[in-house]
Image (cartoon, rainbow, N blue to C red):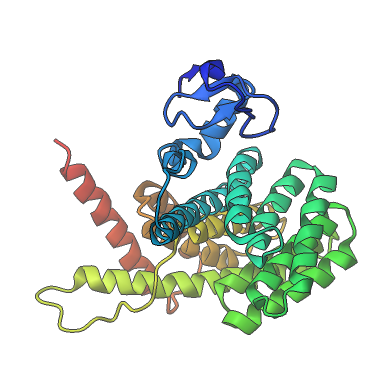
Amino acid sequence: MSSVNPLSNSKGVKLVCELCHSPAYVQCDGCKVTYYCDVEHQRADWTSIHEKICQLLISVRAAVPFLASAEDRAHSAEQLSQRKRQLIDVTSKEAQRLLYEGRHVEVIPAATHALTFTIDVYGLTSVELVPVYLILAEANIGLGNLTQAEEYLSHAYWTVLKTLDCSNLIRSKLHRNLGLLYSTKGEFEESLRHLSNDIYYASTVSGPSDISTSGGYFHMANVFFRQNKMDIADSLYSEVADIWHSHLSSLVDVQIKSSLRSGPVWFDDTNQEGLDENQEAEALQILSAICDIREQAPKKEPAKMSKVLHALTMLHYLSMDYKAAHECGRKLLQLTQQLPRDDTSDSIALLIDNIERKISTKQDSFP
């Protein structure tokens, strides 16, 4: 990530900072097509996203050679567009992951790259801009920059309003962000109205008990929690924990059955997709928050705490963080000793056994 002064570039070429668009005086030594006003902005971009896209930027920012035929020019343009779409995918996914992890400062550069390439590929009025606007809005809400967040949400709102075939999934995400904004401003009734719309639109896509809908319940529970309406908040937190517990249980069941199966596999019962990185990050954010709330509650409810710890143990197991899975599993076993045996007891025992075997195998692989 070392830097050099780029003023030796061709005269007449205006160099601007990747992050703030001020005059640039520092060049990335890796790609040599990215510039910054100072080393601080270079470091911020590198930490956020540039390390992952440094080499990818070369092919989209290098000078385009002259091509004589229209066919060659069209082919070159399509290849360039594909490379930009790849960058949109990489930068937006990374921005979303950082957002779920609460790293709001680092979200901004990655999302800004995603916005720039999305505008370049799809235009200024395209609905494809909305998911990026929402990431930028949520990051700014997290940073307390509410005026900037409102500006991004305004862009997203009007784009959705003007798009007749806008998907309900995008509408769901828009209302979730509006709910978060109004909650931050302390306008709880307006926040709950938007979060209700979030749940409605998400439910039309995946159903009311899907993990994509659970985020709306979770943020609504947080609003009721802030209003000190603890019974309603508790009910919603339980609903979220149940949704994730059910989803993770089905994934773990498939994985454990697969690992125990010996001999040739004559059929495939693993049609259910696993979690992607962003779903893992969202699940960890939500379940960890509910776990903290359960731990700090004046009235301890072992059964509810057990459900959350079981879900967290399964999540760590699926993401192959066996150390964290073992730690959660240890707490889970201690807690279940206070509870009567039920339908989950055998599955918990089998899960813990698999975690311990994974850890043992990993240790044995290192002399």
Between 60 and 90, the one nearer to me in the picture: 60
Quadrant containing the N terminus in the rendered view: top left
Q: Is residue 43 above or below residue 337?
A: above
| Residue that appears at 53% across and 67% down | 307
> Is residue 226 at all visible to an observer of this figure?
no
Q: Residue furthest left?
A: 263
Quadrant containing the C terminus in the rendered view: top left
Indicate the position of residue 216 as horizontal and vertical percent values.
Answer: 69, 69
Q: Is residue 129 left or right of residue 348?
A: right
Q: Is residue 50 above or below residue 344?
A: above
Q: Quadrant of residue 353?
A: bottom left
> Is residue 303 at all visible to an observer of this figure?
yes
| Residue that appears at 55% across and 38% down | 48
Between 74 and 140, the one nearer to me in the picture: 74
Q: Residue furthest front?
A: 68
| Residue that appears at 44% across and 64% down | 275
Between 290 and 199, the one nearer to me in the picture: 199
Q: Is residue 298 above or below residue 259?
A: above
Q: Quadrant of residue 54?
A: top left
Q: Is residue 306 left or right of residue 366?
A: right
Indicate the position of residue 53 as horizontal and vertical percent values.
Answer: 45, 41
Indicate the position of residue 59 as horizontal and vertical percent values.
Answer: 42, 43
Indicate the position of residue 19 as horizontal and vertical percent values.
Answer: 65, 34
